[in-house]
């Protein structure tokens, strides 16, 4: 993945999460992955188009998602309902949008697709012929993994 | 003998002959042509033959994937065989219908664009001759054999290998071949001398401490270095063996190429320039795998820009060390380290902290955070610049990467490896330019 793209995503994730969760957020070591990897439980996906083609996944365990949703809505949410899903979708949207804005400032044109959300157990994600950059983020609510796979359009 | 009897005998003979003929045909193949040559594919693998156009383009696919096609409700991937084998091709208009061979492989169905599908030919499988490098424009490993039918030579493709290749993981191969050597080393031990043992030990420790692997590629250097090393260590009153990472590092100090981790000096620039032939191509593509902070990428970009001012030059530079590669796009150079040709061509500008590259040169290079073991989807390349790259992969991976290089570089394209690395591999022809040794890719 083009190096210029990395920082905007890492920064946006860090900024937004710190802001909305109002809790300690730590960034883990970034790495590349090309084989299949397990999905933690609840995953939001946002597609990217424009100068590039690709997608961003926001992946977390169900209880992390519930805690995140509780923190963002200011009320205790106990089960994975429409509100939880809408909140996680919104979080994905906020982070990706901020990253795209930062990218725009340094001269790259990206478009977003509307986010979608997956839930389920024992899921896997595989990218064929493209590597994914993994940005692990540790919060007091649990781990959130941001998985970015984008590449230049030919 | 009556005429009836005669006739009967004839019929019997004919039947016998036919039967004989029938038993001789035990392999049927669908034949097609590609870039002026005839190829065959086992008919059992072919689902059907069709003509189609207007494929749906899919993002995130290698360049040879044309897209997907809806075959009566079934979605199949369409692969352009010419592109896959790096043969020349005309970019056809989307609407134009092309000949497609639809293959049924073990686990999926794939459509393959060929120049034209010819017919079905039955042969006796015992007449298939082993593959021979002269017969095809494509990589040997995809070929099952060659057969002559009606004075025409057909190259029989092993489609399972062609389309199964990508999934073969590099790691699993590496493990296998790493596990394999013991038999060989056992044999060697019968005649092992003290010096050989010492060399083997150095080999082991370099791999452990620095992930540096001694192989055919750098053995000559390693032997030379070891004899120097013995003298150095003697004066230091230390043992020959490498006991720490620091020892391994100082052993390797001499390995790195000239102008490693800095912009190339005038003399190296001239040597590289001498390798470049005039070309009518409109675009030149270069790849610098594991480019570190990107010095080599900047140097080759500058040289190509000066040499080919009218052509489009594109350099892909990648590294799997995030720290190095993130520094690359905004590299700042100390004033005295910038060679004159960069300053004269105004490829750098002075800032408070030192020289920085100007946009026109930066725009040529695309820096990527990328692990080359994950496979690299790039167009056909004119130059690969992999100085001191291969030695840091184990021999099985070296082999695999070289195969990848061989496939990706165009015919007569150039591969430059480290000053102390030497290729002993078919398909690469040595070219000398001063002290610089480079390799010309020869496609079989």
Image (cartoon, coloured by chain):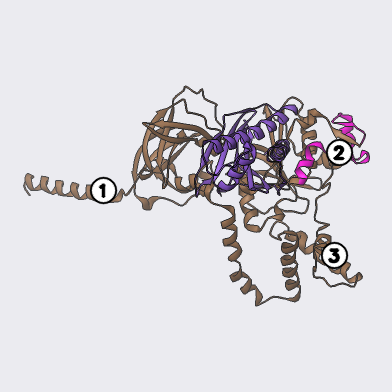
Chain colours: A purple, B brown
**Of residues B318 and B49, which is closer to you in this image?**
B318
Residues marked 1 and 3, same chain: yes
Residue located 49% across and 28% down the image: B56
Identify whether B174 is placed above or below B166: below
What residue is disc 3 on? B228
Spatial CA distance of label 2 from label 1 is 75 Å
Identify whether B376 is placed above or below B284: below
Numbered tag placed on residue B22 in the rendering:
1
State the count of labels. 3
Residue located 46% across and 52% down the image: B130
Q: Are marks 1 and 3 in contact (CB under 8 Å)?
A: no
Report which quarter residue B302 is drawn in. top right
Q: Quadrant of the C terminus of chain B?
A: top right
Tell me the element at label 1. helix
Which numbered disc, 2 or 1, marks the residue closer to the eye? Answer: 2
User: Does residue B379 show up?
Assistant: no
Q: Which residues are magenta?
A: B323-352
């Amino acid at each position: 993945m083009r190096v210029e793209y990395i920082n905007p995503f890492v920064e946006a994730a860090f900024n937004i999460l710190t802001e909305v969760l109002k809790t300690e957020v730590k960034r883990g070591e970034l790495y590349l992955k090309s084989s299949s990897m397990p999905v933690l439980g609840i995953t939001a996906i946002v597609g990217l188009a424009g100068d590039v083609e690709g997608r961003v996944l926001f992946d977390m365990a169900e209880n992390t998602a519930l805690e995140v949703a509780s923190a963002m809505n200011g009320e205790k949410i106990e089960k994975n309902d429409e509100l939880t899903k809408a909140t996680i979708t919104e979080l994905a949207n906020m982070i990706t949008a901020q990253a795209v804005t930062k990218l725009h400032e340094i001269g790259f044109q990206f478009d977003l697709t509307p986010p979608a959300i997956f839930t389920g157990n024992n899921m896997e994600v595989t990218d064929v012929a493209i590597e994914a950059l993994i940005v692990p983020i540790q919060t007091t609510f649990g781990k959130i993994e941001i998985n970015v796979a984008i590449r230049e359009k030919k | 003998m009556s005429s009836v009897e005669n006739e009967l005998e004839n019929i019997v003979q004919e039947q016998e002959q036919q039967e004989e003929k029938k038993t001789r045909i035990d392999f049927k193949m669908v034949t097609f042509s590609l870039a002026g040559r005839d190829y065959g594919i086992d008919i059992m693998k072919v689902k059907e033959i069709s003509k189609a156009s207007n494929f749906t383009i899919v993002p995130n696919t290698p360049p040879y994937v044309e897209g997907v096609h809806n075959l009566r409700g079934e979605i199949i991937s369409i692969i352009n065989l010419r592109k896959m084998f790096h043969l020349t091709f005309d970019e056809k208009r989307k609407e134009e219908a092309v000949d497609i061979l639809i293959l049924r492989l073990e686990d999926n169905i794939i459509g393959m664009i060929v120049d034209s599908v010819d017919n079905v030919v039955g042969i006796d499988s015992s007449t298939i001759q082993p593959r021979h490098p002269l017969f095809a424009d494509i990589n040997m490993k995809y070929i099952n054999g060659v057969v002559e039918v009606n004075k025409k030579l057909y190259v029989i493709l092993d489609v399972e290998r062609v389309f199964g290749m990508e999934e073969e993981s590099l790691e699993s191969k590496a493990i296998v071949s790493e596990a394999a050597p013991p038999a060989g080393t056992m044999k060697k031990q019968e005649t092992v001398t003290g010096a050989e043992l010492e060399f083997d030990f150095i080999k082991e420790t370099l791999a452990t401490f620095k992930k540096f692997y001694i192989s055919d590629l750098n053995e000559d250097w390693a032997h030379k270095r070891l004899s120097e090393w013995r003298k150095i260590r003697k004066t230091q009153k230390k043992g020959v063996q490498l006991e720490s990472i620091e020892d391994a590092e100082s052993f390797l100090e001499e390995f790195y190429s000239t102008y490693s981790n800095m912009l190339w000096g005038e003399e190296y620039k001239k040597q590289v320039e001498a390798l470049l032939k005039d070309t009518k191509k409109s675009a030149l593509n270069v790849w610098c795998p594991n480019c570190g902070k990107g010095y080599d990428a900047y140097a080759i970009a500058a040289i190509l820009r000066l040499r080919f001012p009218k052509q489009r030059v594109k350099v892909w530079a990648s590294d799997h060390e995030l720290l190095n590669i993130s520094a690359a796009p905004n590299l700042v150079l100390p004033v005295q380290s910038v060679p004159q040709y960069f300053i004269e061509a105004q490829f750098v500008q002075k800032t408070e902290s030192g020289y920085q590259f100007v946009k026109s040169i930066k725009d040529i290079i695309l820096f990527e955070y990328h692990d080359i073991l994950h496979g690299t989807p790039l167009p056909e390349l004119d130059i690969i610049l992999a100085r001191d790259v291969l030695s840091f992969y184990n021999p099985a991976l070296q082999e695999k990467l070289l195969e990848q290089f061989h496939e990706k570089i165009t015919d007569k394209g150039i591969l430059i490896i480290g000053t102390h690395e030497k290729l002993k591999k078919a398909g690469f022809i040595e070219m000398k330019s001063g002290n610089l040794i480079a390799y010309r890719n020869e496609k079989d």
